[in-house]
Amino acid sequence: MIERRNIQLVVVILGFIATQVESLRFDLQSGLTKCIAEDIKSHAMTVGKYHIVNPNEGYPLPDTHKVTVRVTSTYGNTYHQGDNVVEGHFAFEAAEAGDYMTCFFAADHKPPVTVTLDFVWKTGVAAKDWTSVAKKGSVEVMEFELKKTLENVKAIHDEMFFLREREAEMQELNRSTNSKMAWMTGLSILLCLGVAGLQLWHLKTFFEKKKLI
């Protein structure tokens, strides 16, 4: 978590396969913002659901317990926004790869209040409602499991290609960095030799003027 004035950043790092489900419960103090980031591949399906936990079960939720929610992409495109809400959900297909950010903001109150939120974010295969798929298609258990396995295999396949692309980008960056470092090293050596030559010439001229040599 990184605190910067009134902004707190919570970065959620997913595992090797982007099909995990991240279920979070966290506290948000009034006047502060908490953001959760997730790296999503292009054209991957993602769904999220959030709600405020009632601190007094069996009683109405206090008016102070509301948040503003915004989901944005790496390039600042907004995919979901809810103003002064107690719950909500979003679902979309990522148009661009990168870190997607879900930010929760609680309005400032005097005295300060703390809001507890439950947040579930699903991506990839986990974002698909397999229960409804089984009900709608009336498929047998074996066929259902095969479909689910196939989706997982596709997700792994896509993730492998995604990692290969990242690896190629890193290798290209390393080659570029090594080339620049070699060029800078050569320039530094030439500069040092030039300075040393000037120093020798200056000393030789000085000694000649003093008729020491």
Image (tube, rainbow, N blue to C red):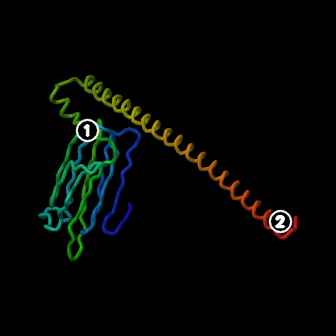
Res 86 → quadrant: bottom left
Res 3 → quadrant: bottom left
Indicate the amino acid at tag 1.
Met
Report crowding for label 2: few under 14, some 14 to 19, many 20 or more residues within 10 A (C-alpha): few
Measuring from the top left, give residue 108's x and y in whole percent.
21, 71
Q: Residue at x 31, y 26 (%)?
A: 150
Indicate the amino acid at tag 2.
Glu
Q: Residue at x 27, y 53 (%)?
A: 102
Which numbered tag is attached to residue 45?
Answer: 1
Front position in the image: 191 or 77 = 191
- Give the side of residue 18 with respect to residue 209, left or right: left
* SS for dot 2: helix
Measuring from the top left, give residue 46's x and y in whole percent.
26, 42
Which residue lies under the disc numbered 2? Answer: 208
Eye-nearest disc, 1 or 2 = 2
> In which quadrant is the N terminus drawn?
bottom left
